[in-house]
Amino acid sequence: MLKEIEQTAEVARYLWEKGWAERNGGNITVNVTDSLDEASKSLPAIAGPFPIGTILPHLKGCFFYCKGTGKRMRDLARDPMSNGSVIRIREDCSSYEIIADKPVMPTSELPSHLSVHDYLLAKGSPYRASLHTHPIELVALTHNRKWMEKDVATNMLWSMIPETKAFCPRGLGMVPYMLPGSVELADATIKAIDDDYDVVMWEKHGVFAVDVDVMSAFDQVDVLNKAALIYIASRNMGFEPDGMTDGQLKELSTAFGLPK
Ligand SMILES: [Zn+2]
């Protein structure tokens, strides 16, 4: 099995253990094109073609591992090839076929995930994985208007512990509530990624993260949620945490060459 698929199964287990993936919640799609050998790439279709619903010109001939629609992360962790499948984007850039291992239909959010991958490839980004999950404390933050303002949550989270800025150096982009799976939400997510965020918060719903691989995307969400937990722990101790100073945060950026 591909390293990327083994890693996806490992991340799926973490998502379940953290309580971020109830029922069939969350999605993962990984661009595995560069990892497949020529023999695998020429495997015949076992199902399809199916329309994507949109034209994605940069994905011609690309291959993706996708979580299956209605499948649970906790099941994917045990058996990734029965709870997800590998798809090939066809020449027309607007349809796909399933090539392995079983005819498991991909996530219903496939068009939005693939739109993000198309955007990333068009930009020349090295990012190959996208992750959507429901991290409890980060979602809770979005139930208060103050945290939805640009970079208010980012600055608070960064200021809780230096590693947060070091390992999630672009912060948390905010997208107001939109219907799950809608074109509007996909467009707003791409706009937020284009505004230089790797992790995007969907108000009252969850996060969408992109990175070189799914473990790195998970790590970014994990450090952000850890910072939210530290904030909550301080509030539970009865005080508003001071947070690191602006000067200390700037010093980190200089010392580690961070983008913001
Ligand atoms: Zn969701």
Image: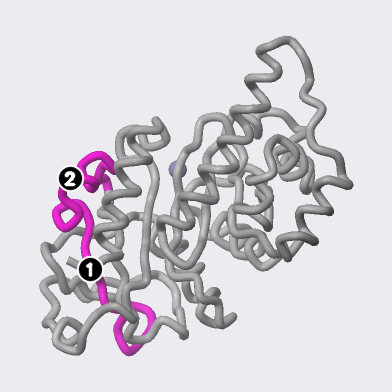
Q: Which residue corresponds to the image point at 77% horizontal and 24% vertical from the top-left?
A: 241
Q: How many marks?
A: 2
Quadrant, the N terminus: bottom left
Secondary structure category for the residue under label 1: loop
Q: Which residue corresponds to the image point at 59% horizontal and 28% vertical from the top-left?
A: 229
Quadrant, the C terminus: bottom right
Q: Which residues are magenta?
A: 70-95
Q: Which residue corresponds to the image point at 44% horizontal and 70% vertical from the top-left?
A: 128
User: 87 and 258: which one is in front?
Assistant: 258
- Is residue 127 positioned above or below 221 on the image? below
Q: Which residue corresponds to the image point at 35% horizontal and 55% vertical from the top-left?
A: 108
- Is residue 87 positioned above or below 135 on the image? below
- Marks 2 and 1 close (CB-CB < 8 Å): no
Q: Residue furthest front?
A: 255
User: 134 and 17: which one is in front?
Assistant: 17
Mark 2: amino acid = Arg
Q: Which residue is mark 1?
A: 2
Q: Which residue is mark 2?
A: 78
Residue 213 in percent (x, y) is at 42, 64
Cα separation between marks 2 and 1:
15 Å
Asked if residue 44 lies left or right of residue 69, the reply is left
| Number of other residues with Cα within 10 Å of mark 1, as a class: few under 14, some 14 to 19, many 20 or more | few
Q: Quarter of the picture for ligand 1?
A: top left
Verify whether residue 147 appears in magenta. no
